[in-house]
Image: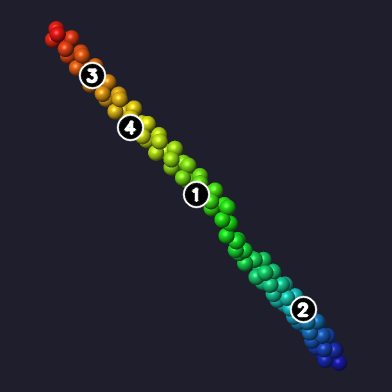
Amino acid sequence: MTGPLEKAARDAVEAADNTELTRQIAAILAAQQLLNAQQQTAAPAPVRREFNATQWLVVGGVVVSVGLVASLFAVALAIGATCATACLLILRSIWRDMQRGR
């Protein structure tokens, strides 16, 4: 008689273990589904901003102003270089004349 009772007890313990394992697997699957759902909703769609004309007018005004300042600086530099070159040429001519005794 101990044989069938022991077998029945082993079967009952095995069934209880199997049930617990099934519960753990179900809990893991549910957690993974929740995690996937959270990850999918975590990334919102990019928000498209409206066109702001004032912003672009300011940017254009700044670009034009900087361009004008740069061009005026380039013209001033060119005038300065021309004057310096003329001055050096005149001084060289005077120096040569002084060296020749004129």
Q: Is residue 76 left or right of residue 12?
A: left
Inter-mark Cα distance, 2 to 1: 66 Å
Q: Which amino acid does label 4 sit on?
A: Ala
Q: What residue type is labelled 1?
A: Gly
Tell me the crowding category of disc 2: few under 14, some 14 to 19, or many 20 or more residues within 10 angstroms, Cα based. Answer: few
Q: Position of residue 76 (x, y in %)?
A: 37, 31
Q: Which of marks 2 and 3 is nearer the N terminus?
A: 2
In the rendered structure, find residue 23 and report the number of the disc placed on it: 2
Q: Where is residue 75 in the image (x, y as percent from the top left)?
A: 36, 34
First along the sequence among labels 4 and 3: 4
Mark 2 vs mark 3: in front: 3
Instruction: Give the number of the disc on residue 90.
Output: 3
Left or right, 94 with reference to 22: left
Query: What residue is shown at x 37% (from left), y 35% (from top)?
Result: 74
Cα distance in 3D space between marks 4 and 2 = 86 Å
Q: How far apart are marks 2 and 3 (CA)?
A: 102 Å
